[in-house]
Image: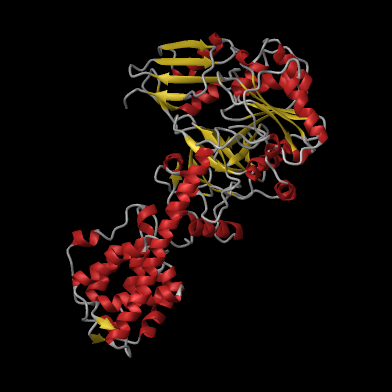
Amino acid sequence: MSAKGPPLESLTRRLAETPAAFLGEPRIGPKGNIVVPALVRDVLARHGLSVDVSTLERFAPRDVALDRNPRMLTQILCWLLVDESFTGRLDAAQVLKILLDEADLLAVTVAAREFVDNGERREELARLALRTAGMRPLGESLNVAEDRWLSVSTAERVRLNSASRAAEERARQIRESLVRKAAEESADKWSRE
Amino acid sequence: MIDPAPTDAERFPHLSEAGATLLKFMREHPNAPRYRNHSGHRLLEADLAELRAHADEVAQCNVDPRADLNRAWQVDFVQRALRHVPYYRRYGSMPTQLAHLATIDRGTLARDVAAFVPDDLPLDRLINFRTTGLTGQPLLIASHPLVAARYLAFHQRALRRFGIELQSGPGTVGVVLVGWQQRCFTYVSVTPLLGDCGLAKINLHQDDWRDSADRGQYLDALAAEIITGDPLSLGVLLELPFNHRPRALMSTSMSLTDGLRLALEARFQCPVLDLYSLNEVGPVACFDPRLGAHVLLQHRLVVEIVDADGEPLGGGERGEVTLTGGFNFCMPLLRYRTGDHAALEQRDGEWVLVGLSGRAPVRFRRDDGIYLNNIDVTHALKPHTMAQYSLVQRADASFDFSVYGPMLADMAGIETALKDVLGENCVLRTRHVREVCDKVVQYRSDFPG
């Protein structure tokens, strides 16, 4: 984070104004209109980079249930990374890391659209991209930038951990609650299936 | 650990004097069966107002099952599911079209039903229904007393199509649910929405009765306004000597043949409703002979017909019935593939499922090498009065045809009808199975190719 980057607000505003074309449905089988590997290839090209086809194929979603959300986030990140402030600041490995690995992690529990609609999530994504590119927001010292990053990312991690624990506890309660009921000792229906 | 058995006060909150008298009458009648279980409506006073409002809404609504994320209720339902149901949260953001979301099926629910219960739903009144379905795959359905009670509104909507308004009230029996199984959950209850009228769930299998002759006498004594059951148990009714004429019969669980429907109508001189109902979503549709199709009943249920990849098919094309919405707020369903097949059409201004049949279509090879769909067999057997049947094509191309339950039809006539579609020279073995057989796969082919 040694290099000075753009003002944070310029990136969060960019995210808030993500064009509809980047918020469309990723192509999964016959569904969707955005071919994510092609989009990633274009982003790499904007940075003067390229990777082999098999690497790009890792961005091709296959399972609607599992891949739709992470690849929508990849699309949003693509829009962020073509901001001119990132030009020449990223190598191919860094671009792939943020577009694939980071997107997969973040999309486990947060809907991609939240990174456009929610101020805190926008800040998290902007700081993540800057950090990956070795930059910090304009006007922030190294220490301040580090503190702010820890604050948004730790807060998110704590929230996720706590949500995950709560979800596990809740699922346990539901399973126990359902199992505890005696079989069919239930309420009346006028017909049974 | 199993919860302690609820008390009658918990099963029947605010039980009226007439209701208590009726429960005693149904339990202690000299011809009553051995009731093996207990159950009750578990509805609280506050639930009743909600249920009445729901019944009014169901009575007056227009049913339009098309997926359209411009309609407020569909947007609200999908948004809420994506936000509050753990399984769907991974889907991510609200789509512009429902078809952009993944489909789920019975196996998905069976793996962990807890992931389908919204995380803001209080668990204190959660109940369950268990089902094994035709696949034998056990499934636990998360439900609620309000959900179970909402069935009635859809039954009433279906009955109104046949000109029937329920009249049951205090001191009368509203419904008898008949089963015909080796083991059956049986109990008596009351329905508070209709003045604590009676509800009895009985098993017509002789093992549940002190004397087989009690069955008809008990049905006469209860004089229920409606009798519900499946084609097997309703077929048994045809064999019992009793005089009572219900105002309607309702058949669920399996497809009802035209032959059995006509025989029941002739015997009981009342309409016989064929309901398409699933534990997962409740009553979905009711067969209307005038339209020759199942008319959809629920106004907050999206029906898609999809291909093997979950892609929606065009109007009139046959595919898998896939449902979104419904009234079970304990287990919201997003693009649930039912395993049943039909085409979705509008007939006479109403949305209907045409050619509804359980499970995926099965191809049979005729003796001349031509393949035909199981639907052709269904059509050929329509006029024959059978409660339940199965047709299996063996690996050597021969056929085994079985009729289950009471034998109400002429087997020679059935053989002729089958040979008309399967080929004059096919090898066909037929048999009649009188014993109870709960889960029968109607069509299957082991023939390679």
Drawn side of residue B448 relative to residue B420, left or right: left
* Colour basis: secondary structure
Residue A141 quadrant: bottom left
Relative to B138, say whether A26 is above or below: below
Residue B423 quadrant: top left
Instruction: Report the number of numbered marks.
Output: 0
Residue B180, x across and y down, in percent: 60, 20
Residue B36, x across and y down, in percent: 62, 23
Drawn side of residue B244 relative to residue A119, left or right: right
Front one among B447 and A178 = A178
Relative to A8, say whether B294 is above or below: above
* On-image quarter of the C terminus of chain B: top left
Front one among B336 and B10 = B10
At horizontal 72% and vertical 41% (from top left) the residue drawn is B13
Residue B97, x across and y down, in percent: 48, 58
At horizontal 41% and vertical 14% (from top left) the residue drawn is B426
Drawn side of residue B73 relative to residue B313, left or right: right
Residue A34 at least partly seen: no
At horizontal 64% and vertical 37% (from top left) the residue drawn is A187
**Which residue is the extreme one toward the bottom?**
A139
Residue B160 at least partly seen: yes
At horizontal 59% and vertical 59% (from top left) the residue drawn is B71
Residue B410, x across and y down, in percent: 58, 10
